[in-house]
Image: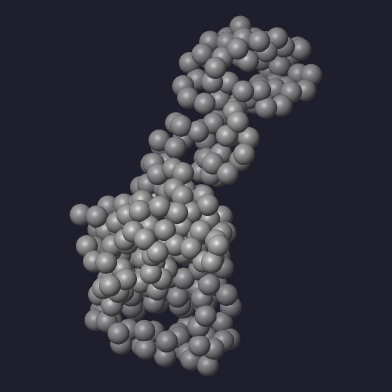
Amino acid sequence: MVAIDISQVSRTFGTIRAVDQLDLRVSDGQIFGFLGPNGAGKTTTIRMLLGLLQPDSGSCRVLGRDCWSDSHAVKAQIGFLPGDIHLPPRWTGDDFLKYHGSFRKQDPQRLKALIQRFDLDTSRRLGDLSKGNQQKVAIIAAFMHEAPLLILDEPTSGLDPLMRQNFMELIEHERQAGRTLFLSSHNLQEVERVADQVGIIRDGNLVAVETVTELRRLCERTLSIAFSEEPDLEPLTRLENVFLRDQTEHRAIFGVKGPPTGVMAALAGMSIQDFSFPPADLESIFMHYYDTRAETS
């Protein structure tokens, strides 16, 4: 089953086209990482999925329902964590979670377990809480109803390392329970750790939708070499998939796309003191799609 189905969706604000002919499908039970800088169209897309914005054209569907015409039913199927939370400062955590819980059926034991997981004192007024503790309240509110779809925007913002680890364990638990998670975050290491698939949005368009493994294969890796003597780089630079990025007297940095078979053969005949050739991580992949130099390589 398709949990999220976005088909040829466009949305403009005056002369600004925030989303342009966007196509995206997320399977049921998948963790999908949705990446892009501010202004790329992430928030507009999320607001359309929540039924808060109507597309100018195309359609957004969640679990088979149209997000705009059937928005009430769609909202009932979503646990949402906004990127910019605003909690009523005079309410306690207990007040807020009780109010939030009144809209849907919930399991009191699940709520209790979430509060314990994040070590939250719900008796304190929300306005007196730190940013991290306010984030815990918002996370608990998003997860407490066991919604089949969770849309999470910058979920670990403000959390300390221990609480981030708790959150990642919660994500794994939800995956095992078969829930779908749509995760938008600037913390690329966290997305890389949990996402089954990643979509990168640029200027309202999806420029890549792949598994992290496939993105690594497609994108440029950095090869850094320290030579024991001034090298002849021609055996490397003549390769079609190798690009010289920087060079000093005894060191060179290359970008390598695709299989490294030819690179390894060329290196075998060189006087190498040291080298590094790490796999592409999600941050370098992301920068590849936003680096104008990549378009001209």
Q: Nearer the viewer, residue 130 or 203?
A: 203
Percent position of residue 24, x then y: 35, 51
Image coordinates of residue 199 in percent, x first then y, are: 42, 48
Q: Nearer the viewer, residue 171 or 49?
A: 49
Residue nearest the observer in this picture, 12 or 219: 12
Residue for point 50% across, 88% down = 88
x 57%, y 10%: residue: 266
Quadrant of image for the N terminus: bottom left
Farthest-out residue, top? 269
Q: Could you tell me if residue 187 is visible in this image?
A: no
Q: Quadrant of residue 277?
A: top right
Q: Is residue 241 above or below residue 281?
A: above
The residue lying toward the viewer, choosing from 262 and 107, is 262
- x 40%, y 53%: residue: 22
- Residue 45: which quarter of the image? bottom left
Residue 148 location in percent, x, y? 26, 66
